Amino acid sequence: AATIYYDKDADLKALAGKTVAIIGYGSQGHAHAQNLRDSGVKVVVGQRPGGPNYELAVSHGFEPVSAEEAAKQGDVVNILLPDEVQGDVYRNSIRDNLSPGNILMCSHGFNVHFGQVVAPKGVDLLLVAPKGPGHLVRSEFVAGGGVPCLIALDDDASEETFKIGMAYAKGIGGTRGGVIRTTFAEETETDLFGEQAVLCGGAAALVKAGYETLVEAGYQPEMAYFECMHELKLIVDLFYQGGLNYMRYSVSNTAEFGDYTRGPRIVTDETKAEMKKILSEIQNGEFAREWILENKAGAPAFKAVRRRERNHPVEQVGKELRKMMSWIEEKEV
Ligand code: NDP
Ligand code: MG
Ligand code: MG
């Protein structure tokens, strides 16, 4: 079983007298910077000027500096930039401003595990990754709770670095929810697998295939939308509260019988074999190479598929229907 740490296992004193540099004031950055500051930790924000995130940091009372300057000032330096830009920004602006004894942090192991961020000699690598979006990391903290986190150390990191990691996790509220000990490899590989096979890739493909099946059979698109997309939230909420058992307790017996007898015909042995293939492409670095090279080329395939996917019929129908449901906090991107 996993080792899980809570408040009593962490001491904020490990960060006393140290400066934490938060590089990037986006989803995670704005939450880590504010939560740490509220926990009494000295924080410097590294955020490039010219955009709304710079203004946001200023409006929250920070005085943002460049990534170079933040890396220089920080004893603990957390890179909270989009994964696909971390390698370049690290090599160009951060690496040469680190000093021996500093700790380099991230909230997802992709760049460290796949060799895009390599710490200089004397700098330990530490991962503290909240298992939720930054806005929840902030709102839960303010409400007195905390989003659970993962913690990982590079092989040769010291016990002192672990203590600082635990203090960091406590400072952002993570120890209130629980902090699971993991490794860079495990965090990176399971995170990529989850988003590809189940959460984003698997779920989106399932919704689209279900929607298309109903519409192609002549049913009204609005009915297909409600059945295959809208109601999914209600089901997932039941998973979240009480697992599959609670979902099956809550739905009708007819739905439960359909689940047991039809579900395995949708996600078959063939699907599972493909999942294993996807996992091995993550493990052997093939996925990472594809994504890194895609970005070096200016992301042409990514942009093309993104444009095509935006216009899927389920998106058109959904947009109209959501306008009529006033209780939904509607988001349009
Ligand atoms: P965001 O996309 O929200 O980060 C945006 C920040 O990066 C902004 O400050 C932005 O500045 C800056 N930025 C973007 N491009 C550049 C660039 N080329 N040069 C300099 N700065 C740049 O990132 P997230 O917070 O989502 O992710 C940060 C890390 O946290 C990632 O490793 C991610 O995997 C991890 N993580 C994210 C989670 C999430 O739910 N979002 C959950 C757990 C981990 P500007 O406004 O000027 O563009
Ligand atoms: Mg992920
Ligand atoms: Mg139904």
Image (cartoon, helix red, strand yellow):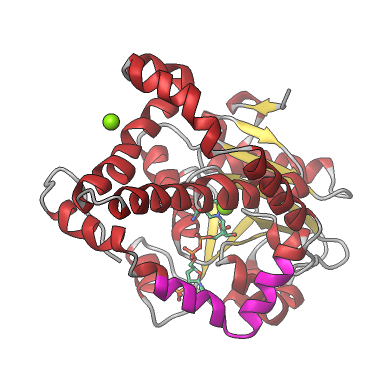
Please give the range of residues in magenta.
Answer: 288-308
Res. 72 in view:
no
- Left or right: 190 with respect to 58? right
Q: Which residue is at a point 49% across and 72% down the rendered structure image? A: 47
Q: Which residue is at a point 35% across and 60% down the rendered structure image? A: 60
Magenta-span inclusion, residue 307: yes
Quadrant for residue 149, please give it.
Answer: top right
**Percent of width and height locating residue 222:** 19, 50
Q: Which residue is at a point 73% across and 51% down the rendered structure image? A: 277
Give the answer, above or below, for where 98 lies relative to 42: below
Most extreme residue toward the bottom is: 297
Judged from the image, the quadrant occupied by ligand 3 is top left
**Percent of width and height locating residue 254:** 34, 18
Quadrant of the image for the C terminus? bottom left
Give the answer, above or below, for where 316 lies relative to 18: below
Quadrant of the image for the N terminus? top right
Depth check: give the residue in front, 200 or 184.
200
- Left or right: 80 with respect to 289? left
- Left or right: 49 with respect to 330? right
